[in-house]
Amino acid sequence: MKNLKKLLFVSLFFILNACFNHADDITIYRSGKIELVSTIEISDKEADKDQVNEEIEKKIAQLKKEGWYVSYKWKKKSKPYKIIFTASNNIDKIHEYQVETEGDTPSGIYIYKKFSDKQYVVTFDLLSDANNRILNLSRNSLPLYRVNDDGKLEFTRNIKSEKKYYVVLD
């Protein structure tokens, strides 16, 4: 029975991760607040609403452990399901949590280095769990900077997973 539960959980994990479209909008404010708005559309015919709800609650519990304030609403309660998540946290609180837990980050936003209270290097490991996932930096966000091939910092609004970006809160 225990193995059957594990198999069911693993199957559900792959169902939910393989059969959805996911778009994230990230906003980084001067105060250090990071806001993440995620729109998820689950198209799998096998997933029922209770299974989806269970997975949502697990993910929310993980994010709350890291200090995120999370809310969500169902935009479409019939198949294909559509859910919008809103989560916010502070870049410094995310960094503190990662120091305490030696790098754990349920949000996928990793503070690679903290230079000061105003300067950070971050990575966004948000794209690793889905083929159909888009990550956008919102218009209201502070810009991100990357080191170009010449070794100079350049402004960028295009976010790619697992690349290092400099955030300056000024």
Image (spheres, rainbow, N blue to C red):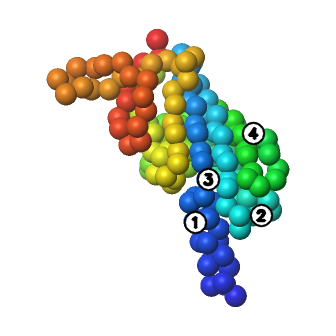
Disc with the residue nearer the chain's start (4 vs 2)? 2
Side (left or right) of 156 relative to 36: left
Please provide percent x and percent y for residue 74: 79, 44
Q: Residues within 10 Å of mark 1 (few under 14, many from 20)?
A: few
Quadrant including the N terminus = bottom right
Q: Is residue 106 above or below residue 36?
A: below
Q: CA distance from mark 1 to mark 2?
A: 14 Å
Q: Which residue in the structure is indicated by mark 3?
A: 20
Residue at (71, 68) in percent of width and height: 46
Instruction: Give the mark, 3 or 1, whose residue is nearer the N terminus.
Output: 1
Which mark identifies residue 48?
2
Secondary-structure class at tag 3: strand
Q: Amino acid at mark 1?
A: Phe
Seen at 52% across and 39% down, the residue is 134
Q: Which of 97/50 is in front?
A: 50
Indicate the quadrant where residue 113 lies.
top left
Disc sitting over residue 71 in the figure: 4
Q: How many residues crowd around disc 3 within 10 Å: few (fewer than 14), some, or many (20 or more)?
A: some
- Name the residue that disc number 1 marks: 14
- Residue 14 picture quarter: bottom right
Marker count (numbered): 4
Q: Earlier in the sequence, mark 1 or mark 2?
A: 1
First in sequence, mark 3 or 2: give its number.
Answer: 3
Q: Nearer the viewer, mark 1 or mark 4?
A: 1
